[in-house]
Image: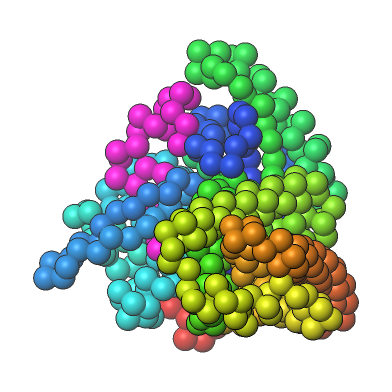
């Protein structure tokens, strides 16, 4: 979300291209011919890349086949992202659609390390993919895993490496490419959208039978791109929150702190909370609304299923004895918010922002088990099911307090880090200024081949 494409340069300049009605789970929007026309005719982007995600099998005599995820990409894929090869080179323009006698592949860093033992001489060697010999021309740098936020590619090939995609490449009605662009300096998304829509209208007028339905263009910043893991997160958040709510309810009923901690870890609500905070920081309404709706839907699902569980347990006579007697130490911590609730939420919010922006996933576990969101939602439902209305009110306030503080601290933390990073970049700019030597032709050194 904060680093949507690890390893890419200045991701705030990148936009994802959607054709048709906007959706959280879209299909690839463009054919190759439409993509090529948009790439060649636009005046608002410094580059427009395309890719298609798939899986394929690595094969080798005497070794077990291994399924890997690949990206079939346009030749400018790495260049638009600003990614430099660790070894070798990336694709050339003339290699984009040409089926070669022996096609080329770029290996991901992890695959190069694990499957090929980090062989420093891998460039130029032939490997076998789906029983076809393929020449390795480069290795991507460590940390770069592809252009789809949250998803991983192990290797990259061109759009027609084996000659099997010829039909796709020559028919406008075959939409199979996801497309990203990089805005020109000073160009806004709104201006770029108008530019691409003008081109798209010309394409639709020239080939109407291949463009039935809606053909409007929408550009999204990468942190809210509908392509990648964002759509999956939106779909699974209510399910995971409902499961976490059930675990939390059992923990409250049985006074089990272990189950409460487990519910906190399972709950994915922090992703949506940070989505709202990021939208506030970017002053963008759509992610704020989407994040709030996701939180409302998720917590509603958790409370509904937990209420049903509470009623079933109560009516069947299986309520734990201590809970029936009012001995509820876990519940009393949840439904009595106080100053310490605010302090913990503030500290957890600070740690959460730093963990996400510095890619320290382990620290996020501490955030998950510090905030009382899922337990509060579960306690609301349990209290309603057992008619404990004062406890329900206390837990509702606890839930609202934690979510509000986390969103506020998230937005403030992102703004503070943006200021700090800006000051750091300005301070380092003189040291990193390119020297004249960087612009001179490279001289052959002694020992060069």
Q: Is residue 187 above or below residue 372?
A: above
Q: On the rendered structure, is 129 left or right of 12? A: left
In the rendered image, which quarter is residue 435 located in? bottom right
Q: Residue 355, how many percent across, how many down?
A: 66, 78
Classified by dominant secondary structure, the portion drawn in magenta counts as loop
Q: Is residue 173 magenta?
A: yes
In the rendered image, which quarter is residue 339 located in? bottom right
Q: Residue 394, how many percent across, how many down?
A: 75, 67
In the rendered image, which quarter is residue 415 located in? bottom right
Q: Is residue 169 magenta?
A: yes
**Residue beneath the point at 68% across and 51% down:** 296
The answer to whether residue 146 shows anywhere in this view is no
* Colouring used for the render: rainbow
Q: Is residue 148 above or below residue 374?
A: above
The answer to whether residue 58 shows anywhere in this view is yes
Number of residue marks:
0
Q: Which of 217/91 is in front? A: 217
Split into 4 quadrants, where in the image is the N terminus? bottom right
Split into 4 quadrants, where in the image is the C terminus? bottom left
Q: Which of 294/392 is in front? A: 392
Q: On the rendered structure, is 31 left or right of 411? A: left
Q: Residue 37, how many percent across, how many down?
A: 59, 30
The segment highlighted magenta reads 154-176
Q: Is residue 49 above or below residue 332?
A: above
Q: Residue 410, how many percent across, how many down?
A: 78, 68
Q: On the rendered structure, is 424 left or right of 103? A: right
Q: Which residue lies most toward the bottom here?
A: 446
**Residue beneath the point at 48% across and 68% down:** 319
Q: Is residue 249 above or below residue 160?
A: below
**Residue beneath the point at 53% across and 33% down:** 30
**Residue beneath the point at 79% across and 83% down:** 340
């Amino acid at each position: 979300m904060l680093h949507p494409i690890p390893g890419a340069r200045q991701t705030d300049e990148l936009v994802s291209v959607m054709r048709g009605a906007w959706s959280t789970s879209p299909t690839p929007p463009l054919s190759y011919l439409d993509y090529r026309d948009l790439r060649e005719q636009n005046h608002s982007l410094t580059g427009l890349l395309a890719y298609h995600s798939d899986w394929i099998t690595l094969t080798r005599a005497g070794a077990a086949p291994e399924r890997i995820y690949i990206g079939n990409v346009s030749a400018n894929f790495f260049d638009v992202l600003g990614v430099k090869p660790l070894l070798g080179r990336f694709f050339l323009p003339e290699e984009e659609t040409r089926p070669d006698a022996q096609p080329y592949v770029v290996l991901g860093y992890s695959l190069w390390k694990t499957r090929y033992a980090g062989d420093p001489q891998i460039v130029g060697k032939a490997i076998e993919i789906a029983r076809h010999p393929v020449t390795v021309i480069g290795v991507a740098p460590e940390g770069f895993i592809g252009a789809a936020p949250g998803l991983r590619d192990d290797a990259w090939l061109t759009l027609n490496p084996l000659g099997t995609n010829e039909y796709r490449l020559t028919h406008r009605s075959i939409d199979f490419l996801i497309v990203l662009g990089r805005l020109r300096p000073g160009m806004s998304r709104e201006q770029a959208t108008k530019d691409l829509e003008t081109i798209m209208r010309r394409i639709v007028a020239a080939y109407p039978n291949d463009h039935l339905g809606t053909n409007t263009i929408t550009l999204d910043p990468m942190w809210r791109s509908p392509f990648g893991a964002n759509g999956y997160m939106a779909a699974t958040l209510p399910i995971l929150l409902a499961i976490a709510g059930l675990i939390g309810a059992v923990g409250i009923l049985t006074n089990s702190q272990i189950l409460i901690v487990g519910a906190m870890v399972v709950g994915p609500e922090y992703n949506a909370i940070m989505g709202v905070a990021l939208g506030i920081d970017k002053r963008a309404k759509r992610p704020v609304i989407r994040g709030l709706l996701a939180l409302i839907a998720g917590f509603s699902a958790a409370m509904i299923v937990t209420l049903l569980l509470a009623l079933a347990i109560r009516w069947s006579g299986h309520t734990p004895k201590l809970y029936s007697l009012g001995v509820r130490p876990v519940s009393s911590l949840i439904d009595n918010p106080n100053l310490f609730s605010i302090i913990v939420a503030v500290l957890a919010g600070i740690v959460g922002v730093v963990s996400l922006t510095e890619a320290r996933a382990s620290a996020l576990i501490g955030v998950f088990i510090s905030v009382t969101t899922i337990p509060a939602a579960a306690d609301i439902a349990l209290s309603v099911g057992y008619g404990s209305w004062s406890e329900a009110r206390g837990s509702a306030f606890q839930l609202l307090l934690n979510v509000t503080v986390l969103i506020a601290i998230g937005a403030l933390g992102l703004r503070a880090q943006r200021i700090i990073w800006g000051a750091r970049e300005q301070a380092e700019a003189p040291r990193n200024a390119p020297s004249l030597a960087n612009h001179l032709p490279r001289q052959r050194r002694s020992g060069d081949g």
